Image (spheres, grey):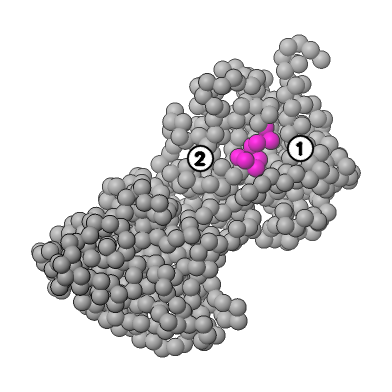
Amino acid sequence: MKCNYRVAWVVWAFFLFFLVGTKAWPCSEVFVGSAPKARVSARNFDFRSGRGFVHFSPAGEKKSAQYAPKGCRPLPWVSRYAAVSFNSFLPQARSPEGGFYSAGVDGVNVAGLKIGTYFLASSSFPGKGPATAIDVASLGQYLLDSFQSVGEALADLKSGRFQVTSLPTETLAIKLHLFLHDASGASAVVEFLGGSIKITENPPIPVLTNSVYSESLDHLKNYKGFGGKRDIPGANGSLDRFVRGAFYRKQLPEPADAAQAVNFGFAAAQTLAVPPEFPHGCTQWTIVTDILGRRVYFRTLNNPTVASINLPAVAEAARVSSDIDLWRTDLSGDISGLFSRSADFSAAAVPRRPEYDNPENWAELPPAGGEKKPVDVFFVHPTAFFESEVWNESIESGLKNPRIDFSLKKCASAFRKSCNIFAPHYREAHMKVLRASEANKEKAMAVAYEDVERAFDNYLRHFNQGRPFILAGHSQGSNLLLMLLEGRFADARLREQLVASYLIGWSVTTDDLRRYPFLKMSAARDQIGCLVSYNTQSEKPAMTIVRPGAVGVNPLTMDLTDRFVPAEKNLGALFVTDSAEIEIPAFTGAQTVNGALVIPEPSRKDLVRTPFRGFYHPYDYSIFYRNIERNVAERVAAFLRRRQGGN
């Protein structure tokens, strides 16, 4: 999957986080240096979230705009130049099947074309134009991919062969203006005003914020040093930042070399930084680009240590696109080697492993000091990582990933009445493992499994205190728990504490049961130490994840019956939305057919939405929620009776 500059399809997009509010975010750039010594761009990316990625794009990739208005086709292109770019995520729509957009923030290509984008609320794009269109959030990447100079890029923008549009998201129409530079020393500000393109070539003040450039110049005349009497302002408004940037740039001496220009760039960016207390976003990333050297230096709010990228070296070694997660806190020095050289799993790019003695690395723990229930559940969340093209999510990204919290609310909560919940964060595998080779899949899953096993051992050492426990998960989480069962539960002492395992959204096969005879599928509601596994779909879905030889349990009976069980046995589906929990008794019946849990087409299509016809995997828990909740209580009661010597 190429998530960059295409709408990303999201199989398990239970929940979309919202990075943008109703107001725009600020950003600033100061251009430092002149030929022949140095040409350096220094910019801040100010936003409500630092979630994003650095993307390397090789030459020769087919791409297209990620959005075009009705009646237009997205502009297609093939990249001519390798480039590195910084990108943020934007929600496409508030719906379970919705995806995300990738918004290009800053980048440079191997030819020395550098482009930054900045929000401009007053942008007004052409209402009509050619039948080919590109959204402004994709425009920067298109120009980086296609041109080696500011002149070439401007000529293409003026050609009229395509129209530029805003990018509509759930909460805000993305409107941007651009600041372009190249290795020759040329610069230009590109804006879309009054339905037309406005270009300011070689702008006299090499600063850009979030106001129309000509208006910024007019405002500057009011300040000391630029013809006016006002003192230089210190506030965070767009025009204030422009004045402050212009003043700082004016005071800078010409740098002696690129290294000094980079240092000057970080210093200039610091004067324009927005503090974290600012309600509509703060400085999340500072990016300083040595255009002549094609080197990028950056730091983030989450990680103030400067990291660097040597674009020529990456372009020489890498032949595939890849990403680096900007939430990571272990990025330091030259990180060029973290980009993938080939399509295969890259051990060099594996993020640091979490330490489970740190409570922060648990998605959920029981409240401190509260009275403990007699049984625990060790819950492993499903795939919640769909965005950037990496093999495993960093732990820092997971800590900020609201889909994980949503999965706990949607799935793990079914165990809350009966159990204390212990749910670790882990370096989950990206969903691209679904289409990866077995070798690459195994390596990515091994990283995720290492964390789950270490978290389980930490749970046993520090939290369990001899209580019985349930293993439960969904999707990837269930896959990892099956690996844990197969690798560790030949130990009879562990099995003595195991109430049951709910491996929902993953297939347990006849081969699994043959190779590991201590694994038993549920044959009764109160059976102890058994497995509950099923995958929900229609009879003929457009997509299935049911493995060959799957053995499925019907959650309405908690046994292996293959008869149809009517909706009257469904105690209640529970659908979690952004604003409510919707419960519907007798939502549907179900039947196990060739290892799949087959249900009729749901009548509430507003609650059961999926990108693939008949693929109900995201709702494995939701559709049978109350049956799962009751069954957990039944098995817990049966286990405790047995432990106490009862029948």
Quadrant for residue 408, please give it.
top right
Kind of residue sitting beneath label 1: Arg
Q: Position of residue 578 (x, y in %)?
A: 62, 50
Q: Position of residue 424 (x, y in %)?
A: 53, 35
Q: Residue at x 10, y 64 (%)?
A: 253
**Number of the label disc, if any, that sits on residue 426:** 2
From the image, which quarter does the C terminus lie in? Answer: top right
Q: Nearer the viewer, mark 2 or mark 1?
A: 1
Residue under circle 1? Answer: 626
Q: Position of residue 2 (x, y in %)?
A: 51, 64
**Which is nearer the N-term, disc 2 or disc 1?**
2
> Is 418 located above or below residue 534 in the figure?
above
Q: Secondary structure at mark 1?
A: helix
Q: Residue at x 56, y 80 (%)?
A: 73
Kind of residue sitting beneath label 2: Tyr
* Crowd around label 1: few <14 · some 14–19 · many ≥20 (10 Å): many
- Label 2 and label 1: CA atoms lie apart by 28 Å
Q: Residue furthest front?
A: 229
Quadrant for residue 144, please give it.
bottom left
Q: Residue at x 30, y 75 (%)?
A: 215
* Crowd around label 2: few <14 · some 14–19 · many ≥20 (10 Å): many
| Start-end of magenta stretch | 408-415
> Is 181 located above or below residue 286 in the figure?
below
Q: Is residue 493 left or right of residue 113?
A: right
Q: Is residue 557 left or right of residue 242?
A: right
Q: Position of residue 95 (x, y in %)?
A: 63, 57
Q: Please report contact status of discs 2 and 1: CB closer than 8 Å, yes or no.
A: no
Q: Is residue 339 magenta?
A: no
From the image, which quarter does the N terminus lie in? Answer: bottom right
Q: Residue furthest top?
A: 645
Q: Residue at x 60, y 35 (%)?
A: 379
